[in-house]
Amino acid sequence: MFSIGDYAVCPGHGVGQICDIEEREMGAQTKTFYIIKILANGMTVMVPTDSETGIRGLVGDSEVEEVYKLLKDHDIKVDNSTWNRRYREYSAKIKTGSVVEIAEVLRQLFLLKEKKALSFGEKKMLDQCRELLAQEFSLSNQSDKNSVNDKINSYFQ
């Protein structure tokens, strides 16, 4: 359970802060929802408190280190399928909300960018992945988001 003021990650949206916990009538039953304000864009989302795939807490130090280790490893096969197939596959990974999945997409896009130009959608996705990771890592480690962004970028220079 989360409390008002806690930070939580909404898959596909990013980090948000729980503003309220409300009960709503849904047909014949009453459901409880977290009201979450997404930090990146100010959007407000409602997530059922009993949802298994709804939200998760911020990552810990071990997950952050795992992601940095993954970003360092450039010895992988770059996906050369069509851009729209890659885009669908990457979108599905981002929607899981897993920092490891998001980092894998980020790494793939950075490495693909070295070989050829990215499509407009892929460029946006690269920025989205970097933003999702930087926002969460900066909050979980109480560090500056720009320094986290710089650290992520340093793995690909």
Image: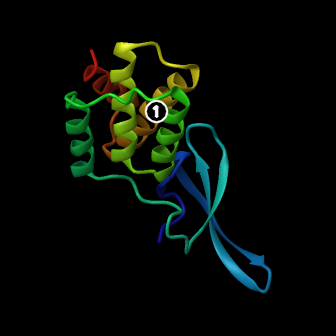
| Amino acid of disc 1 | Glu
Tag 1 secondary structure: helix
Q: Nearer the viewer, residue 107 or 148?
A: 107
**Left or right of 26 in this view: 72:** left
In terms of depth relative to the viewer, which is nearer, 27 or 80?
80
Q: Residue at x 27, y 14 (%)?
A: 157
Q: Is residue 104 left or right of residue 16?
A: left
Q: What residue sits 48% from the left and 34% below the top?
A: 86
Q: Position of residue 118 (x, y in %)?
A: 48, 18
Q: In this figure, which colouring scheme has been used for the structure?
A: rainbow
Please rate how many residues cluster around mark 1, counting C-alpha atoms within 10 Å: few if below 14, some from 14 to 19, many from 20. some
Q: How many marks?
A: 1
- At x 54% / y 39%, what residue is drawn? 88
Residue 156: percent from left, percent from top: 28, 20
The residue located at (26%, 33%) in the rendering is 71
Which residue ends up furthest to the bottom in the rendered image? Answer: 28
Residue 36: quarter of image: bottom right
**Vertical placement of residue 67 versus 19, above or below:** above
Q: Position of residue 75 (x, y in %)?
A: 19, 29
Q: Disc 1 designates what residue?
A: 131
